Amino acid sequence: MIPSPASSERFPRMMGEFDLIKTYFTRPTKRAVLGVGDDCALLALAPGMHLATSTDMLVEGRHFLSTVDPYRLGHKALAVNLSDLAACGARPLAFTLALALPSVDEKFLEGFSQGLLDLAQAHDCELIGGDTTRGPLNLCITVFGEVPAGQALLRSGARVGDDVYVSGALGDARLALEVLCGRLNLPSNGLELTRRALELPQPRVSLGMALRGLAHSAIDLSDGLLGDLHHVLLASGVGARLNVDAVPCSSLLQEQPIDWQHECTLAGGDDYELLFTAAPESAPAVQALAAAQGIPLTCIAQIIASERPGELRLHDKHGAKVVNQWHSFDHFAAVNT
Amino acid sequence: MIPSPASSERFPRMMGEFDLIKTYFTRPTKRAVLGVGDDCALLALAPGMHLATSTDMLVEGRHFLSTVDPYRLGHKALAVNLSDLAACGARPLAFTLALALPSVDEKFLEGFSQGLLDLAQAHDCELIGGDTTRGPLNLCITVFGEVPAGQALLRSGARVGDDVYVSGALGDARLALEVLCGRLNLPSNGLELTRRALELPQPRVSLGMALRGLAHSAIDLSDGLLGDLHHVLLASGVGARLNVDAVPCSSLLQEQPIDWQHECTLAGGDDYELLFTAAPESAPAVQALAAAQGIPLTCIAQIIASERPGELRLHDKHGAKVVNQWHSFDHFAAVNT
């Protein structure tokens, strides 16, 4: 802590760090042994469970626009982390929040905490600790889940012959971003519809848990389909053959020129759907799961043996080869090219 | 992820996000079930153990100066988190790192990761996951430790009659900061000596573990002694009587005017020593522990019953009352006064 001379003044009249935490971010915990307010939070794991953990940092201008509604920002900050738990097949338990704020903006904090805690409650995931500081707006959440030992879904489990599935529809988040940035137009209600995909993604938590024992590998789609699939292929030491026209997208995106469709579905990012691989003989079980969960699960590719792990062969619905002209999001790529 | 048009260019020639993680922040894990490189990391807890977790965010200009040596910044970023585990009596297991960087500065990353991982190795604490993004420099670490169920040291356990101890010497970090900011002068080697306290704090991990079953309550000193003690008093529903002249400080600080001594020791912040309370009859055991660990443990106060929980009565070595004119660091207090 670097105190400025001004900080030697007596207690503030307005909200300070500890009031802020107490007002907006302290809730009774049901499941954690100890929640917000001590040096550490304490969690107990049920016997036979492993702890699954993931951390994501969101920065203004990189992960969200300055105009975003605070409620939706709170929702999304937790959603992207829950999506990582989903990709491992883990059940959410708890999370911590570290927050840098330029100033105490109570209107922002009210909306942000509400969006955050509403989603947390929907997934029975408790806020158990955190940190607040002054600085350029930055949100860092670490999420904790539990998964039976040996049953976590990993990127490294894809097997030759597996079908590759994605949940839901891809590309709407990117479509909304293009509209918000003024690079595309949509019919009147189109922005609000796609904007929900960008700002209120629904992490596929129950789907992830249901995929334990069925999927051989899984990842969540955050940086763009092709790049995220590439991670699975590399980790598994295999390749894939992918039908670019099989990738599911919304009717709004289907009305866009084919180049935009492909850009948004293949390299759009921010989808927070699950990609997973499963044996071909599991196809009926996968479709039964889709029906049970009310979530489309679409087969878009097959895992192939390859001498170049990570190899990705693209083709269209006619079987014609498609050149991979897309790449997924890399936070530092744009800076250094 | 909000891609800029520039990010649609093909793969970068310079280091991207995933190379950066692989080069600087991926090490084989010995203890974690799964480390860096999947959607989640996986940790197993030994039977009967609770998970202790804490998160701290460090922002340039608030928690460190822009001139800080990257190695020391890496050390400190983890040290402040390990200090929270120490305050709970937990044994470090692992940590995650989220890092926002203005650009890929390999010289910075090399020093930073070395300082971080050297301290991690010293405490057998593995880096198991994280996130990197572009943005104003921001470091967020979440640390995981284990503590036998029911044995965690809490802020809420102080009992009337307890002695209040602090480890080590307080105030040198603040003294260094005052010199660095040009508000104080020290003899030639004084800055380097005190600067080590500011930039290379040693978290009291083994002391924290040894205090299990001996201390009734504990907290780590990060925001200033009086403020941190106040947290213990409030959480425990008690008051304290504290001898301001009993607070241990270095010989360098002893040479400073008494007002500066008190400012630095009582409200300095960034000490990362432990404050704990223990029964008077435990005094010999506390001193035996001090000898065994080679760390001074100094009794500075007594816990008293109070109708106003949090009440703090200060006196000097002659027993004369001292008015509390200090307050501890609050990240938003300075902004709002």
Image: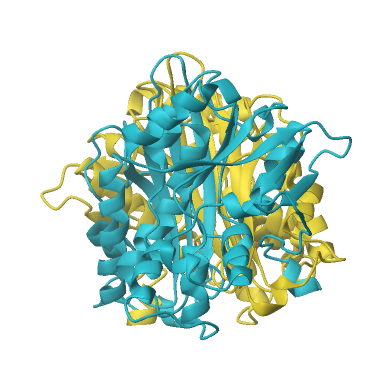
Chain colours: A cyan, B yellow
B64 or A113: nearer the viewer: A113
Eyeballing the image, is B193 above or below A150? below
Q: Where residue B102 sits in the image (x, y, percent)? A: 68, 72
Eyeballing the image, is A126 above or below B245? above
Q: Is residue B330 left or right of residue B142?
A: left
Eyeballing the image, is A167 above or below A47? below
Q: Quadrant of residue B292?
A: top right
Q: Residue furthest front?
A: A318
Eyeballing the image, is A127 above or below A185? above
Q: Where residue A299 sits in the image (x, y, percent)? A: 56, 40
Q: Residue furthest bottom?
A: A182
Q: Where residue B247 sits in the image (x, y, percent)? A: 47, 52
Q: Is residue A171 left or right of residue B333?
A: right
Q: Is residue A1 left or right of residue B130?
A: left
Q: Residue at x 47, y 48 (%)?
A: A81
Q: Residue at x 32, y 56 (%)?
A: A116
B283 or A157: nearer the viewer: A157
B77 or B178: nearer the viewer: B77
Q: Which quadrant holds the C terminus of chain A?
A: bottom right
